[in-house]
Image: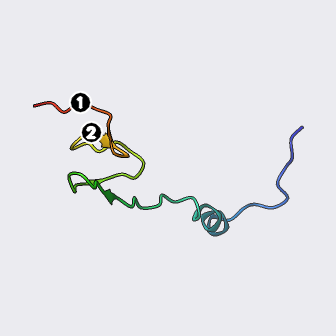
Amino acid sequence: MGAVPRKKLTRARKGRRLASYKLSPLHPSTCPRCRIAKRPHVVCPGCGFYRGRQVIEETV
């Protein structure tokens, strides 16, 4: 048999516990090559560069 809770958990107490599980806002950085906003540690969607190297070929 599993463990049984001793008392009923109120909605307020449950809500306070679950309040810490929230999404944090994204902090976009700018691409040093084309100056558009991008997510950090991700290939730039505009120019295809990541850490000074071209990873994705540009389509004309």
Looking at the picture, how far across and down is residue 2, in whole percent?
86, 41
Q: Is residue 22 left or right of residue 12?
A: left
Relative vertical location of residue 12 with respect to residue 23 in this rendering, above or below = below
- Going by the numbered disc 1, the residue's amino acid type is Glu
Q: Are marks 1 and 2 in contact (CB under 8 Å)?
A: yes
Which quadrant does the N terminus fall into? top right
Looking at the picture, how far across and down is residue 34, in whole percent?
20, 52
The residue depicted at 60 percent of the width and 65 percent of the height is: 15
Looking at the picture, how far across and down is residue 30, in whole percent?
29, 58
Q: Name the residue nearer the viewer: 8 or 58.
A: 58
Q: CA distance from mark 1 to mark 2?
A: 6 Å
Give the quadrant of residue 12.
bottom right
- Going by the numbered disc 2, the residue's amino acid type is Gly
The residue depicted at 24 percent of the width and 51 percent of the height is: 33
Which quadrant does the C terminus fall into? top left
The residue depicted at 40 percent of the width and 58 percent of the height is: 26
The residue depicted at 27 percent of the width and 39 percent of the height is: 48
Badge 2 density bin: few <14, some 14–19, many ≥20, Cα 10 Å? some
User: What SS does tag 1 mark?
Assistant: loop
Read off the residue under disc 1: 57
Q: Is residue 46 left or right of residue 41?
A: left
